[in-house]
Image (cartoon, rainbow, N blue to C red):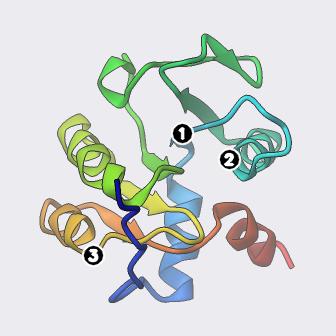
Amino acid sequence: MSVQQCEMPECNPPSERIKAILQKCKTVAIVGLSPKPERDSHKVAKYLKENRYRIVPVNPGQKEILGEKCYPNLKAVPFPIDMVDIFRKPESIPPVVDDAIEMGAKAVWMQLGLAHNQAADKARREGLEVVMNKCMKIELMNMTK
């Protein structure tokens, strides 16, 4: 099995727009959230939770992460999600984006090192904001400087 290389994002919103996205999207589903504290997904989720975001763990192998109920997939989340933050391999991104569109999310965020231009284009066509290859924690920390 070959590993798909991550592509570079063709475009991202300007810094002011990213700041606006982070200010309006307060309920964040984190797809691929690890229960392991040393993992980036865990560190980002913990930071978000400590900074007044509602985190929604999405990981089929877990029941709870960071004191929050964990869902097996986005479709299982029974309430509205503002943003979907993706910590998955590039080949797993398109179905996650499809679910984000279907559930009415306002934005899709692909973490640092992740980009999928075709899925991003589809999300944008459906009216979602898209940020790729950026860390939400870093962007939030930069906003408060």
- For this orientation, the residue located farthest to the top is 63
The kind of secondary structure element at disc 2 is: helix
> What is the x, y in percent for residue 121?
19, 72
Which disc is residue 100 wearing?
none
In percent of the image, x 36 and y 66: which residue is there? 4
Give, as a three-letter code, the residue at label 1: Gly
Instruction: Give neighbour class at mark 1: few <14, some 14-19, many 20+ (Cα, 10 Å).
Output: many
Q: Earlier in the sequence, mark 3 or mark 1?
A: 1
The residues bearing labels 3 and 1 have C-alpha atoms spaced at a distance of 20 Å
In percent of the image, x 22 and y 61: which residue is there? 123
* Of the pair 13 and 91, the residue shown nearer to us: 91
**Residue at mark 1:** 32
Along the horizontal axis of the image, is 110 left or right of 9? right
Q: Are the residues tagged 3 and 1 within 8 Å (C-beta)?
A: no
The kind of secondary structure element at disc 1 is: loop
Which disc is residue 41 wearing?
2
Along the horizontal axis of the image, is 69 left or right of 90? right
User: Is residue 93 positioned above or below 60 on the image?
Assistant: below
> What is the x, y in percent for residue 48?
72, 47
Instruction: Give neighbour class at mark 3: few <14, some 14-19, many 20+ (Cα, 10 Å).
Output: some
Q: Are the residues tagged 1 and 2 within 8 Å (C-beta)?
A: yes
The kind of secondary structure element at disc 3 is: helix
- For this orientation, the residue located farthest to the front is 1
Q: Earlier in the sequence, mark 1 or mark 2?
A: 1
The residues bearing labels 2 and 3 have C-alpha atoms spaced at a distance of 21 Å
> What is the x, y in percent for residue 126?
14, 59
Q: Earlier in the sequence, mark 2 or mark 3?
A: 2
**Residue at mark 3:** 117
Residue 100: which quarter of the image?
top left
Q: Are the residues tagged 2 and 3 within 8 Å (C-beta)?
A: no
